[in-house]
């Protein structure tokens, strides 16, 4: 994931549109397609986001300083109600909008999958990108700053741009877990 961008090199709007075109091909339960995206490609819009998503009393750090250089931010939103309504339709078999039918929140998972397609597409387009979250304490402020309806959930934000050299994340010192450590065949633990 890229955490520092060249602010002098904008991402063409056509490229952003192509990446979002990939996103809408992500899988979605019942073809509910309950994702929405807010593209922040104007400096004042990105500044509104950063002002709402960060605490002005907290000093900036190198991560935030680097992320603020991204020329594009894409706020990924999920619409739970789109899924509840879709699965209350006759072809799905449920007759109510009860969220307890769902073993996991597929509206958030599907939005994450759509976001992953943007991330992969960014790499193919020669761009850098990073997926990050908005803290619980700042969610309401971001909703208000970007006029996001209350019924939509902020799943995450994708920063997008031309990468600059950056220091490696200290987390990478841990290394990736080997496949054999995370995969079982035919039965968990085997």
Image (cartoon, helix red, strand yellow):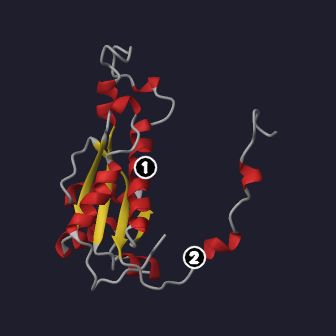
Please state which of residues 97 and 163 is positioned toward the viewer in this rendering: 163
Q: How crowded is mark 1: few (under 14 residues within 10 Å), some or many (20 or more)?
A: many
Examine the rendered structure and indicate whether residue 72 appears above or below residue 8.
above
- Location of residue 45 in the rendering, given as x and y in whole percent from the top left corner: 19, 68
Residue receiving disc 1: 112
| Residue drawn where x is 43% and y is 37% of the image | 106
Residue 149: tell me if it is visible.
Answer: yes
Q: Residues within 10 Å of mark 2 (few under 14, many from 20)?
A: few
- Location of residue 121 in the rendering, given as x and y in whole percent from the top left corner: 39, 61
Q: In this view, does 151 lie to the left or right of 189?
A: left
| Residue drawn where x is 28% and y is 59% of the image | 18
Residue 141: tell me if it is visible.
Answer: no
Q: Quadrant of residue 190?
A: top right
| Residue drawn where x is 28% and y is 82% of the image | 9
| Residue drawn where x is 32% and y is 33% of the image | 32
Residue receiving disc 2: 169
Lower position in the chain sequence, tag 2 or tag 1: 1
| Cα gap from disc 2 to disc 1, whole angstroms | 22 Å
Q: In this view, does 185 lie to the left or right of 67?
A: right
- Location of residue 176 in the rendering, given as x and y in whole percent from the top left corner: 68, 64
- Location of residue 37 in the rendering, given as x and y in whole percent from the top left corner: 27, 53
């Amino acid at each position: 994931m890229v955490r520092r961008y060249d602010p002098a090199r904008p991402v063409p709007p056509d490229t952003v549109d192509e990446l979002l075109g990939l996103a809408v091909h992500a899988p979605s339960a019942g073809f509910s397609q309950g994702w929405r995206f807010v593209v922040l490609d104007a400096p004042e819009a990105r500044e509104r986001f950063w002002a709402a998503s960060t605490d002005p009393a907290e000093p900036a750090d190198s991560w935030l300083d680097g992320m603020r250089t991204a020329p594009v931010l894409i706020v990924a939103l999920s619409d739970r109600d789109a899924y509840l309504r879709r699965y209350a339709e006759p072809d799905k078999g449920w007759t109510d909008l009860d969220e307890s039918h769902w073993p996991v929140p597929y509206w958030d998972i599907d939005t994450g999958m759509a976001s992953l397609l943007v991330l992969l597409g960014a790499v193919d387009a020669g761009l850098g990108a990073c997926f990050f979250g908005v803290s619980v304490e700042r969610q309401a402020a971001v909703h208000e700053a970007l006029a996001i309806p209350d019924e939509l959930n902020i799943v995450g934000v994708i920063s997008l741009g031309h990468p600059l050299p950056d220091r490696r994340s200290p987390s990478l010192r841990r290394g990736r877990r080997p496949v054999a450590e995370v995969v079982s065949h035919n039965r968990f633990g085997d």
